[in-house]
């Protein structure tokens, strides 16, 4: 453990954790059903940003930036901003970087006729990250003169700077940058970035688009239009990204619009090649009724079940469909492996987990219904819930779910939902629940048990919580109905009887290649480290690094004749250590020489 942290370090690089969209982190070794309770677990800090967050926070560990390594949480806002914050250090309040792409479209940019999004609408879809290349991909909708443009940006994880090929203007036949809502999360697969599109408030003209861009050059590789000779058939999916299987095939589900079973595929599951050629499709028997009543089939998107050939999804009708990816069968319910009324109305979020105690399970909490768990028997779901909560949710939408576990044990189901009312056309107070995933009747904790400490404000509609490395990151609409935003970070609170961390030992400093290189011994119990500095030119003590995840820091060497003194601190669950024994670096002045005549 080179960084001194005992927990396995987990990255969350895409919406709902993986391209199967299972919603699970199976490597959570810190948070357990035993320690997630109101006395041991709560809000550690929150960060206010410039507007609402519709997207799921993403986490990358050990990013090299500013002379050291940091765990970074990345969030975006509808004001076209992308932020990178230290993911661990409670006192690292300033963003590591923040970029803004300019004036976004908003509710009044067209006569949309509803308040589904009730303010600005710059960045709506969750980004995707390529950690190997050190880049984040995100789409922003900006006002350009009297018109609007959507651009795909490729940003450096460490600085937020656009890479040389970035941004790429998004274009396609029939594509209207204002009317097309980039709602689904982006997906990285097959060396390409996939960008999906829905509408704003079903306002025509729009189509369901899925586009593929080369991840290196940002050149457009292909475009798939779900309704090329018709209209609508959006890829909405309540913000969930497309799914991809081990062969690279891509799965999306469409909403209401034109259908002919030839070129236009509303209310359908679609299977596409990596380059977006249609391979297979499934359309329910009652698709015309679904279309007429605006009961979009695609409110949950597609979830692939690992180790099987199954894909699951459900819509506003609350019917869950299970399909065999090897043969969708085209038109008719008889081609589904099974379909049944899984919840009373809208299905917006599915989570899949294999419990050592309970076996393979699917978690749902639909609109105006109770949280439920369905068990798998082989490759079929028992259609009677194995577990169910007692109190239903009363408004739109249902809960957005995520699950953390250490393999098949210590499972926690996390559910983000509004605490009261209905979130369809306004912001509502939010609540985050934690349930024992082996017994959802057992609530472990919620964010309103100790509201003065844990309340995160207004519910971020359809943004699942992110769980990684003993932290839970929750998006929020902030304090007002529109125009505010924040995210909250939860974790284990300081122990009541805590032993202070020992000061770091073995501190060394040397100059190499024009830089001061500081190293020290990793400290048991330390999550991160801080570095303070004084110098002959700046005698006031100053913190020059926070949130360092490894026992190393570098910065430019001092000017000649200057002395610099460094002190290292360890930071853990129970606070900050005493300072390590200070180390001093002095660069001698150059010797003067007398001119020779």
Image: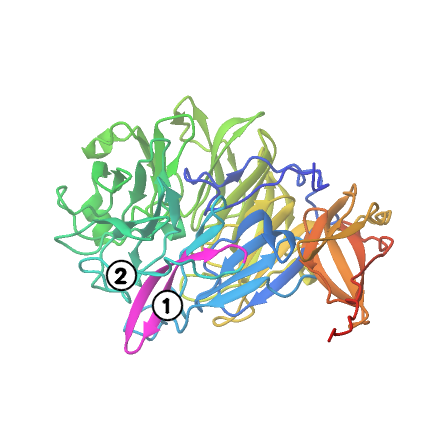
- Residue 390 placed where, x, y %? 54, 43
Identify which residue, 563 or 415, lies in the foreground: 563
Near mark 2 (Cα within 10 A), the count class, few <14, some 14-19 or many ≥20, is many
Range drawn in magenta? 138-158
Classify mark 1: helix, strand or loop: loop
- Kindly give the residue lying farthest to the front in the view shown: 597
Look at the image and tell me whether residue 163 can be seen: yes
- Residue 379 placed where, x, y %? 39, 24
**Is 210 positioned to the left or the right of 359 in the image?**
left
Tell me, for residue 115, which label it has, or none.
1
Look at the image and tell me whether residue 395 can be seen: no
Tell me, for residue 353, which label it has, or none.
none
Splitting the image into 4 quarters, where does residue 119 fall?
A: bottom left
Splitting the image into 4 quarters, where does residue 511 fall?
A: bottom right
Identify which residue, 179 or 438, lies in the foreground: 179
Near mark 1 (Cα within 10 A), the count class, few <14, some 14-19 or many ≥20, is few
Q: Main secondary structure of the magenta part?
A: strand
Identify which residue, 399 or 231, lies in the foreground: 231
Q: Which residue matches tag 2? A: 202
Q: How many marks?
A: 2
- Residue 297 placed where, x, y %? 29, 46
The answer to whether residue 139 is magenta is yes
């Amino acid at each position: 453990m080179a960084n001194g942290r005992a927990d396995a370090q987990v990255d969350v690089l895409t919406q709902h954790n993986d391209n199967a969209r299972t919603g699970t982190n199976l490597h959570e070794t810190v948070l357990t059903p035993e320690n997630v309770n109101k006395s041991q677990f709560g809000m550690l800090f929150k960060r206010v940003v410039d507007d609402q967050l519709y997207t799921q926070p993403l986490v990358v560990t050990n990013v090299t930036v500013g002379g050291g390594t940091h765990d970074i949480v990345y969030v975006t806002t509808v004001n076209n901003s992308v932020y990178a914050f230290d993911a661990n250090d409670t006192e690292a309040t300033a963003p590591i970087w923040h970029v803004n792409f300019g004036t976004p479209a908003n509710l009044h940019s067209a006569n949309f006729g509803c308040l589904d999004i009730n303010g600005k609408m710059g960045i709506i879809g969750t980004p995707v990250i390529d950690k190997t290349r050190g880049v984040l991909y995100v789409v922003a909708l900006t006002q350009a003169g009297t018109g609007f443009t959507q651009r795909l940006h490729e940003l450096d994880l460490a600085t937020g700077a656009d890479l040389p090929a970035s941004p790429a203007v998004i274009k396609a036949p029939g594509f209207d940058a204002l009317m097309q809502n980039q709602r689904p999360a982006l997906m990285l697969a097959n060396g390409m970035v996939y960008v999906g599109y829905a509408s704003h408030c079903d306002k025509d003209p729009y189509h369901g688009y899925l586009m593929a861009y080369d991840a290196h050059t940002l050149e457009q590789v292909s475009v798939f239009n779900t309704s090329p000779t018709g209209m609508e058939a959006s890829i909405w999916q309540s913000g969930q990204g497309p799914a991809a299987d081990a062969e690279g095939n891509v799965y999306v589900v469409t909403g209401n619009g034109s259908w002919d079973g030839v070129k236009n595929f509303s209310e359908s599951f679609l299977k596409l090649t990596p380059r977006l050629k249609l391979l297979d499709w499934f359309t329910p028997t009652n698709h015309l009724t679904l279309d007429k009543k605006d009961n979009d089939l695609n409110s949950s998107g597609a979830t692939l079940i690992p180790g099987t050939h199954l894909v699951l999804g459900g819509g506003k009708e609350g019917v869950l469909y299970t399909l065999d990816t090897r043969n969708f069968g085209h038109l008719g319910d008889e081609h589904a492996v099974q379909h049944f009324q899984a919840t009373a109305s809208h299905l917006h979020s599915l989570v899949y987990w294999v419990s050592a105690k309970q076996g393979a399970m699917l978690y749902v909490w639909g609109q105006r219904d109770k949280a439920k768990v369905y068990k798998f028997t082989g490759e079929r779901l028992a259609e009677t819930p194995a577990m169910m909560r007692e109190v239903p949710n009363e408004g739109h939408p249902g809960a957005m779910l995520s699950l953390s576990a250490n393999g098949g044990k210590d499972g926690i189901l996390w559910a983000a939902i509004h605490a009261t009312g209905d979130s369809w056309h306004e912001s509502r107070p939010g609540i985050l629940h934690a349930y024992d995933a082996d017994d959802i009747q057992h609530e472990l904790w919620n964010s309103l048990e100790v509201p003065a400490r844990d309340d995160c404000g207004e519910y971020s509609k359809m943004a699942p919580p992110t769980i990684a490395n003993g932290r839970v990151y929750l998006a929020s609409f902030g304090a007002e109905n529109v125009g505010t935003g924040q995210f909250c970070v939860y974790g284990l609170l300081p122990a009541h009887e805590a032993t202070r961390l020992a000061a770091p030992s073995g501190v060394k400093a040397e100059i190499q290649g024009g830089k001061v290189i500081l190293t020290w011994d990793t400290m048991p119990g330390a999550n991160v480290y801080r570095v303070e500095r004084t110098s002959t030119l700046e005698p006031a003590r100053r913190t020059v690094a926070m949130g360092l995840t490894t026992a190393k820091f570098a910065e430019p060497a001092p000017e000649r004749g200057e002395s610099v003194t460094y002190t290292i601190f360890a930071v853990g669950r129970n606070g900050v250590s005493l300072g390590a024994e200070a180390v001093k670096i002095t660069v001698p002045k150059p010797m003067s020489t007398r001119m020779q005549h």
